Amino acid sequence: MAKKAYPKGKKAEAKIGKVMGEFKEKTLRSGSKKGPVVKSKAQALAISLSEARKASKKGSKKKK
């Protein structure tokens, strides 16, 4: 199975930093604001990459 590339760009980097900061502060929750606190670093990384992909897709529209 091929590895997925990390999202690139300023928005993606900012989002990854923000989410990992929340993990360190023990405020990162899985699912929604009412979900359980994330305890594993691997899960926090997966959440941050997922959100970074969404953030980088929102701002990148190709012009014709």
Image (cartoon, rainbow, N blue to C red):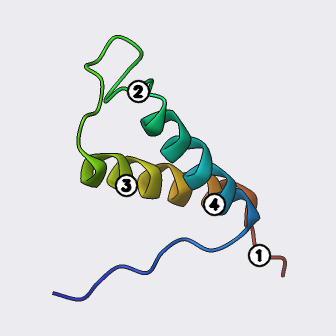
34 or 22: nearer the viewer:
22
Residue 55 x/y as whole percent: 62, 52
Q: How far apart are marks 2 and 3 (CA)?
A: 14 Å
Residue under label 4, please give it: 12
> Mark 2, residues whose alpha carbon is within 10 Å: few (<14), some, or many (≥20)?
few
Q: Distance between the residues labelled 4 and 2?
A: 21 Å
Residue under label 1, please give it: 62
* Among the two numbered marks 4 and 2 on one chain, the one whose residue lies closer to the N terminus: 4
The nearer-to-camera label among 2 and 1 is 2
Asked if the residues shown at circle 2 and circle 3 are in contact, with their CB atoms under 8 angstroms apart, the answer is no
Residue type at the position of mark 3? Leu
The nearer-to-camera label among 1 and 4 is 4
Residue under label 3, please give it: 45
Mark linked to residue 26: 2
Q: Is residue 6 above or below residue 47?
A: below
Q: Is residue 43 above or below residue 31?
A: below
Residue 62 x/y as whole percent: 76, 75
